[in-house]
Amino acid sequence: MDFEQIRAFLNVASLRSFSEAGEKMFISQPSVSVRIKSLEEELGVKLFDRSKAREPSLTEAGKIFIDYAQSIINLQDECREKLSKQREAATGLVYVGSSTVPGSYLLPGLLAAFRKIAPSIDFYVNILDTSAVLEGVLNYSYDLGYVGSVKQDERLKYTPLVDDELVLTARKGLLNKADFKEGVSLDILMPHHLILREKGSATRQLLEKKLNESGYDLNSFNGITYINSLEGIKQAVKEGLGIAVVSKLSINEMVQAGSVDIHTIRGLDLHRSLYLVCHRSRVLGAAARKIKDFSIKEFTK
């Protein structure tokens, strides 16, 4: 078993593609296949289910091996870093996964400020729903994640960064603000059409949880339109398609422009935190550690 076999395994596991793993490692797809096959022969188990040729998935043995494989690579990377005279010279590419709200409304300003002090560090940022981001952190696709909810998993470490609140947004004048100084009751909302994010969205997860606690569910509304884009939802509300519950951070500009109104929902506590998340078993490189520390310092000072 050698390090290049293990790195090939980890890249195929995270990218779910032998060819993309080869591109990342600057070797051919057949070379990746040979390394994986040699590793499987040495271990005496199949690590990937190849029944879907274009998207190999981990077998049960592969799922067991992945954390050990990452630990081995972590030790190699840590050893190299400690032996290097340039250990503290933070350079390179940091892979970041982010859910929609932090990715669109926190990260741009954060990265702009960070670049002023660390111009040699580059970023690959992928904006997905929270569930996909957490999966990417767990399978080592991302060095760091920025998300709007917590999934209980002992492998994940969360650091709260900022407070956020979900608010009801509606077309300008649809709900008279003077009538709802204490918030809009759920009974008033149910006859309206709801515009909603996809299942993996942290915003949707929190809304569904709070509705259920109050004796309601999504079927209580007078119809639902699903849009897997926050910007699409905001524009749909502006055009009068229906009402939506969104992050206050995301809707502030439209409120200030007079395009939509926002309201609280009476009886629902829709406050939450936005988090930085990382894998407890992953030893971050100098560049990733630097942006992690900067994020915590910027948002918790």
Image (cartoon, rainbow, N blue to C red):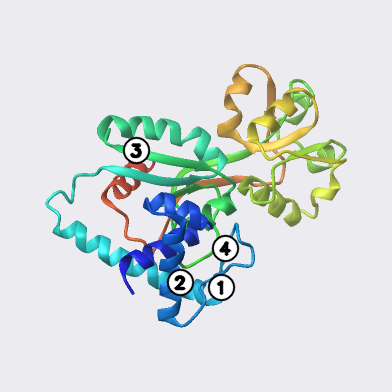
Residue on which disc 3 sits: 122
Q: Earlier in the sequence, mark 4 or mark 3?
A: 4
Task: Determine contact: label 3, label 1, CB under 8 Å.
Answer: no
Report whether 91 appears left or right of 32. Answer: left
> What separation in Å lies between label 3 and label 1 (alpha carbons)?
34 Å
The one nearer the camera, 203 or 20, is 20
Q: Earlier in the sequence, mark 1 or mark 2?
A: 2
- Mark 2 is surrounded, within 10 Å at the Cα level, by few (under 14), some (14 to 19) or many (20 or more) other residues, namely some
Dot 2 amino acid type: Lys
Tell me: residue 205, above or below residue 192: below
Q: Amino acid at mark 1?
A: Thr
Label 4 Cα neighbours within 10 Å, binned few <14 / some 14-19 / many ≥20: some
Q: Quadrant of residue 140?
A: bottom left
Q: Amino acid at mark 3?
A: Asp
| Label located before the other in sequence (3 or 1) | 1
Q: Position of residue 64 (x, y in %)?
A: 48, 75
The amino acid beneath tag 4 is Pro
Q: Are marks 3 and 2 in contact (CB under 8 Å)?
A: no
**Image x and y of residue 182, in percent:** 71, 35
Residue pictured at 84% horizontal, 49% vertical: 219
| Numbered circle sitting on residue 37 | 2
Viewer-side residue, 21 vs 82: 21
Tell me if residue 226 comes above or below residue 67 in the rendering.
above
Q: Which residue is label 4 attached to? A: 56
- The secondary element bearing badge 3 is classed as strand
Q: What's the distance in space between the residues labelled 4 and 3, CA to CA?
A: 29 Å
Q: Position of residue 189 (x, y in %)?
A: 81, 38
How far apart are the two marked residues, 1 and 2, measured between alpha carbons? 14 Å
Label placed on residue 59? 1
Q: Of callouts 4 and 2, which one flags the residue occurring earlier in the amino acid sequence?
A: 2
Q: CA distance from mark 4 to mark 2?
A: 13 Å
